[in-house]
Amino acid sequence: MNVLIIEDEKMLALEIGDFLEKEGYLCEWAKTCEKASEKIYVNSYDFILLDLGLPDGDGFDLLKELKALDQREDAVIILTARGAVEDRVRGLDLGADDYLAKPFSLLELSARMQAIKRRRYKISRNEFDIHGFSIDLHNKEVRFHTEKVPLTPKEFEIFHYLVLNKNRVISRMQLTEHIWGDVLEINSDSNFVDVHVKNLRKKLAACTTTDWFETIRSVGYKINVT
Ligand code: CA
């Protein structure tokens, strides 16, 4: 899952980024409104961590910009030193998903991100089952009944992302964005996504039939669950 950290304090941004990367998130950093705005227009993110006090403007304006874009589901957590109730209320009213007042613990940030993910995808725990496979988000493992499926980290992320978005077509572009990050930096002609998906599918198919794992020709992929 990809995260955009919008924060002008370099040390804090690096600390958050290091921590979340260890947790398996893919992080990008923007330290100004201008840079953040550019990124938001080009990429969509699973999470946006938004500082309110930025050198060239106000985080609330970025939040308004984001919410004015069509078909965006980026979850926004406001991070700010401003503890005022009015700021908190304003952020939530503008459509932020949560709010953390600085200083905050990174463990709390991670727990809140997990909670947003569970709400969003309607999963009740960090482990869930699909067609005989169980996906353990904490240990980043997939098992088929009791047998561990030897997925690479990228294959795990792809499977996890498709399963969370079950019954929806996920395009190659969306997968690229959420698993590899900034699409601007990636050669869009490359078929590397398909190669990873093919390997993933082969490993799943070694366990059981995978007719629920659909390829939508020239669009992307879909995992069907009834
Ligand atoms: Ca700031």
Image (cartoon, grey):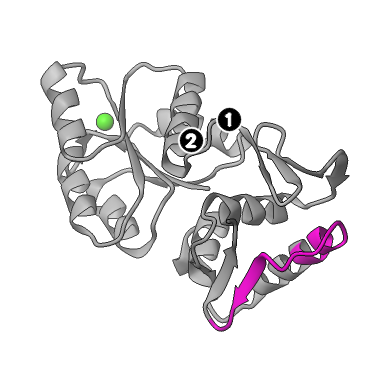
Q: Which mark is residue 125?
A: 1
**Vertical order, 166 against 216 (above or below):** above
Which residue does the numbered mark 2 point to in the structure image? 118
**Vertical order, 102 against 46 (above or below):** above
> Residue at position x 21%, y 45% from top?
63
> Bounds of the magenta span?
201-218
> Residue at position x 26%, y 55% from top?
37
**Vertical order, 190 against 98 (above or below):** below
> Residue at position x 58%, y 69% from top?
221
Q: Position of residue 126 (x, y in %)?
A: 61, 32
User: Is there any visible trace of residue 11 in the rendered image?
Assistant: no
**Vertical order, 196 against 148 (above or below):** below
Q: Position of residue 208 (x, y in %)?
A: 83, 59
Q: Is residue 169 left or right of residue 159?
A: left
Q: Is mark 2 within 8 Å of ligand 1?
A: no
User: Is there any visible trace of residue 9 in the rendered image?
Assistant: yes
Give yes or no for contact between labels 2 and 1 (Cβ–Cβ under 8 Å).
yes
Q: Position of residue 45 (x, y in %)?
A: 41, 51
Give the amino acid type for the residue marked by disc 2 in the picture.
Answer: Arg
Give the amino acid type for the residue marked by disc 1 in the picture.
Answer: Arg
Please tell me whether residue 210 belongs to the stretch shown in magenta. yes
Q: Is residue 11 left or right of residue 133?
A: left
Q: CA distance from mark 2 to mark 1?
A: 7 Å
Q: Position of residue 204 (x, y in %)?
A: 79, 59
Q: Which mark is residue 164?
A: none
Give the farthest residue toward the front: 226
Q: Is residue 59 left or right of residue 190?
A: left
Q: Secondary structure at mark 2?
A: helix
